[in-house]
Image (tube, rainbow, N blue to C red):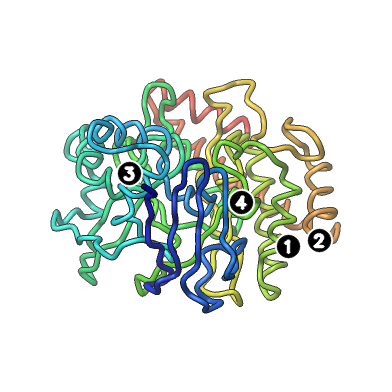
Amino acid sequence: MNANLAVKVSKHDAGYLLQEKESFVFNYTSREAHDFVSLTMPVRARSYVHHCLHPIFEMHLPEGYLLSVIKKQFSKLTATDDFGLLKLLSPNIRGRVHYQEKRKPSHDNLSLEALLNPEHPKLFDDLVTRFAMKSPLSGVQPKVLAQVENKETLKLDDYIVKAWGDDYPQLALNEYFCMVAVKLANVAVPEFYLSDDGRLFIVKRFDIDDAGLPLGFEDMCVLQAKQRDDKYVGSYEQVAKSIKLFSAAGYKNSSLQQFFKMVVLNNRLQNGDAHLKNFGLIYEDVEHIRLAPASDVVSTTAYIADDVSALTLLGSKKWRTRKYLIRLGVNSCELTNKTANQLYDECESSLSQVLEMVIKRLKNETNGQKRKLLEHLAVLMA
């Protein structure tokens, strides 16, 4: 017997996803062009058949830590293959593409202040217990999607709460300073915070607008028709091509400029995890498709000394210097040499500002792990 799952787009019935013996099939029931589930899957009468779960649906599946938690809890009760996981999580997937309208509001009254000022070190474990099933998040880092009450509006906002373990000490502090550098370079970023004890990095979902309405979001694996296991297969030049292919005309130049600065900063900070799923496009409609805010920026060489770039640039995964990055800007991002150099200088200025913050913090820091991380960042930013 075939299993199927109804798919909605902005509360409209769009179609259904069907799992057959050796393939996945998506059929549109809507004939409205604006009910497309993905920029790569326009509305049509013919079925979309794929040997794996279609990338737009696979994007909603958890990875790493969250995947292991959910499988451990439910593997005895239901199938936890990709389609089984999607059906299991579907009531809680909130986005332009969603599946069921049964998302129950939280009554736990969790506040942002409680996340920023945790009263006990086991807060993240408690969040996993409460929110794991409501957290369709990709990425291997321990993270959970928590619903936080806004005290001013009394509405619930979605925040991604990230923790770290012994393998990646002070990862939250690492991400905080890297994201500050990105923000100071005038690259769009989501609202983000570091908890007082440094255990948690907290970032607001950027695919929900101020009115609480979901925006369309598709990462580069979706846009390049790749599965999540292929997120390290590709190049930054190909990402630039996808931006040029799918972004709206009025946003193409600004998106390419933002992307160029993101690549510069990922190289300068030596972020070996800037893979295809960490870049994407966001949109309200096809007239407003643009590069999504930057997120998940960390210095991976703080933990893996000989780490390399996640994707190739000019045919290599080694860290690139200014000359080669400017070449990317001119050849792939449609920048003039003058503009590319100006944008690069903006990145250098932001790194200099954050370097001052890091040095100031180092003067009074006594924790050995934190000092080691801060010293690593200072060397990269100098």
Q: CA distance from mark 1 to mark 2?
A: 10 Å
Q: Nearer the viewer, residue 293 or 95?
A: 95
The answer to the question of whether label 1 and label 2 lie on touching residues, with beta carbons closer than 8 A, is: yes
Q: CA distance from mark 2 to mark 4?
A: 19 Å
- At which x and y percent is residue 254? 68, 66
Q: Is residue 323 visible?
A: yes
Residue 220 is tagged as: 4
Residue 359 is tagged as: none
Residue occupied by mark 2: 334
Q: CA distance from mark 3 to mark 1?
A: 32 Å
Residue 144 is tagged as: 3
The answer to the question of whether label 2 and label 4 lie on touching residues, with beta carbons closer than 8 A, is: no
* 340 vs 67: above or below: below
Provide the secondary structure element on which disc 3 rests. Answer: strand
Residue occupied by mark 1: 244
Identify which residue is drawn at 67% across, 39% down: 267
Q: Quadrant of residue 126?
A: top left
User: Mark 1 or mark 2, which has the lower sequence index?
Assistant: 1
Q: CA distance from mark 3 to mark 4?
A: 22 Å
Q: Nearer the viewer, mark 3 or mark 4?
A: 4
* 103 vs 197: above or below: below
Judge the density around disc 4: few (<14), some (14-19), many (≥20) Cα neighbours within 10 Å.
many
- At which x and y percent is residue 30? 48, 74
The answer to the question of whether label 1 and label 4 lie on touching residues, with beta carbons closer than 8 A, is: no
User: Mark 3 or mark 1, which has the lower sequence index?
Assistant: 3
Q: Nearer the viewer, mark 2 or mark 4?
A: 4
Q: Amino acid at mark 3?
A: Val
User: Mark 1 or mark 4, which has the lower sequence index?
Assistant: 4
Provide the secondary structure element on which disc 1 rests. Answer: helix
Judge the density around disc 2: few (<14), some (14-19), many (≥20) Cα neighbours within 10 Å.
some
Q: Nearer the viewer, residue 38 or 120?
A: 38
